[in-house]
Amino acid sequence: MKSVFIAYNQANTERVEYMLDELGIRGFTYWEDVQGRGHIDGDPHRGTHTWPEMNSATMVIVDDDKVEPLLTSIRKLDKRNPEVGVRAFVWNIEQMV
């Protein structure tokens, strides 16, 4: 099992949910109003007058064979609109209750 943490501009919220539905990934945890800044050239997303945009984040726990199709979809979304931004991070899940 793997955990995939997806951080994205709030403009991509519906696209991320659609992507999960299309891949048959039902369960997720969602956070809205997540603040941050891209590690290379991203602008801050702080919800302030100066930096008004905000991010959201979704975490899913999936079987190993779902990771690559999910990452492929995320890459396509990022290439489609790179200035909006989406990133994904994968962790091993050791145990789950």
Image (cartoon, rainbow, N blue to C red):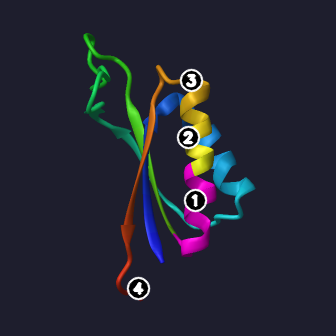
* 33 over 29 or under it: above or below: above
* Residue at horizontal 45 percent and vertical 30 percent from the top: 85
Report the magenta stretch's main SS: helix
User: In the rendered image, which residue does mark 1 sit on?
Assistant: 68
Secondary structure state at the residue bearing disc 1: helix
Q: Which residue type does callout 1 highlight?
A: Glu
Category of crowding for the residue at label 3, using alpha-carbon neighbours closer than 10 angstroms: few (below 14), some (14–19), many (at least 20): few
Query: Which residue is rendered at x = 38% and y = 22% of the image?
Result: 53
The residue pinned by badge 2 equals 75
Name the foreground residue: 29 vs 94. 94
Residue 23 position, x and y percent, is 70, 59
Which image quadrant is residue 16 in? Answer: top right
Inter-mark Cα distance, 3 to 1: 20 Å
Amino acid type, label 4: Met
Give the mark nearer the N terminus: 2 vs 1.
1
Disc 2: CA contacts within 10 A as few (<14), some (14-19) or many (>=20): some
Residue at image coords 41%, 85%: 96
Measured in 3D between alpha carbons, the distance from the residue under mark 2 to the one under mark 1, in whole angstroms, is 10 Å
- Identify residue type, mark 2: Arg
Residue identifier under label 3? 81
Going from the N terminus, do you reach mark 2 or mark 4 first?
A: 2
Secondary structure category for the residue under label 4 = loop
Residues at marks 2 and 4, CA–CA distance in whole angstroms: 28 Å
Q: Nearer the viewer, residue 31 or 15?
A: 15
State the separation of the CA atoms marked 3 and 4. 35 Å
From the viewer's perspective, is residue 58 above or below residue 42? Answer: below
Mark on residue 96? 4
Please state if 46 lies on the left or on the right of 68 as rendered. Answer: left
